[in-house]
Amino acid sequence: MGILVGLVVTLGCVIGGYMAMGGHVDVLIQPWEVVIICGAAFGTFLVANPMSTVKDAGKACMEAFKGAVPKETDYLETLGVLHSLMRELRTKSRSEVEAHIDNPEESAIFQTYPTVLKNKELTNFICDYCRIIIIGNARPFEIEALMDEEIQTIRRDKLKSYNALVAVSEGLPALGIVAAVLGVIKAMGAINESPEILGGLVGAALVGTFLGIFMSYAVVGPVATKIKIVREKKNRLYVIVKQTLLAYMNGSLPQVALEFGRKTISAYDRPTIDAVEQSTMNAGGAGEKQAA
């Protein structure tokens, strides 16, 4: 929603200012200039990126337009599933815990937290490291190094679409010049026409330069930045899991370990300690009833 509002404000101010200076809007309506610029941008985007990145860029744009960042519920459910698993690790046998992490879709714990279960990548991340904890041979600093490496890998993968769109944004002004040059070539073919006709053709050609710069700095660039913000916030869930499990491995009680994870959440989004306690208590009771 914020992107649409921003685009409307930007376009309104640019076009409104142009009209206030006495400009004619119909001069800016050059559909073939748009075809040249957007078509060339999309073509180079396809050339430069694998199809997986192209598809992910579409998904990332939808996330950016929806503002699909983790909400308080996402943080509470992530902390809740970690709390339940840590309690299981402390009180249950290895086979009982393995039943949860080997098949999370059938686990009463994960079913209590549907938001986490729906996020397959996060669920696998949690289960993988709980499995390592069960094995018991790895030391905390080794697990921390491994988690850091995996989180960086996930971050790089999730930001590929951002980097790809930034490259498109940087190339759009040049593609606008290409469209303008083609427009000038067309105008030169009408050099014998009257000044009014020739001036209109040159003006139409210059619209290409305007469109390339405008789309770069007012559309594609800001959308790419929004994608980065959304993806970075989603990546924060993995850091929460990392800090919580490491605290548990270093001897903290489950409720104390949750504080290590909670403190990694931005102060603007961080749920209160009371909200975390209430959430884990309620979910814990629901999970026990479901298991029974």
Image (cartoon, helix red, strand yellow):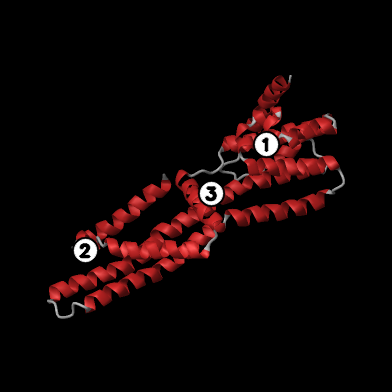
Left or right: 16 in relation to 108: left
**Helix, strand or loop at mark 3:** helix
Disc 1 marks which residue?
Answer: 79
| Residue at 18% across, 77% down | 190
Q: Earlier in the sequence, mark 1 or mark 3?
A: 1
Q: Residues within 10 Å of mark 3 (few under 14, many from 20)?
A: many
Location of residue 26 in the rendering, given as x and y in whole percent from the top left corner: 20, 60
Left or right: 66 in relation to 113: left
Disc 2 marks which residue?
Answer: 27
Location of residue 238 in the rendering, given as x and y in whole percent from the top left corner: 66, 46
Q: Is residue 271 visible?
A: no
Give the quarter of the image for residue 121: top right
Disc 3 marks which residue?
Answer: 230
Location of residue 208 in the rendering, given as x and y in whole percent from the top left corner: 31, 67
Total marks drawn?
Answer: 3
**Helix, strand or loop at mark 2:** helix
Q: Identity of the amino acid at label 3?
A: Val
Q: Earlier in the sequence, mark 2 or mark 3?
A: 2
Query: 163 or 248, which lies in front?
Result: 163
Q: CA distance from mark 1 to mark 3?
A: 20 Å
Q: Label 2 near label 1: C-beta < 8 Å?
A: no
Q: Identity of the amino acid at label 2?
A: Val
Q: CA distance from mark 2 to mark 3?
A: 37 Å
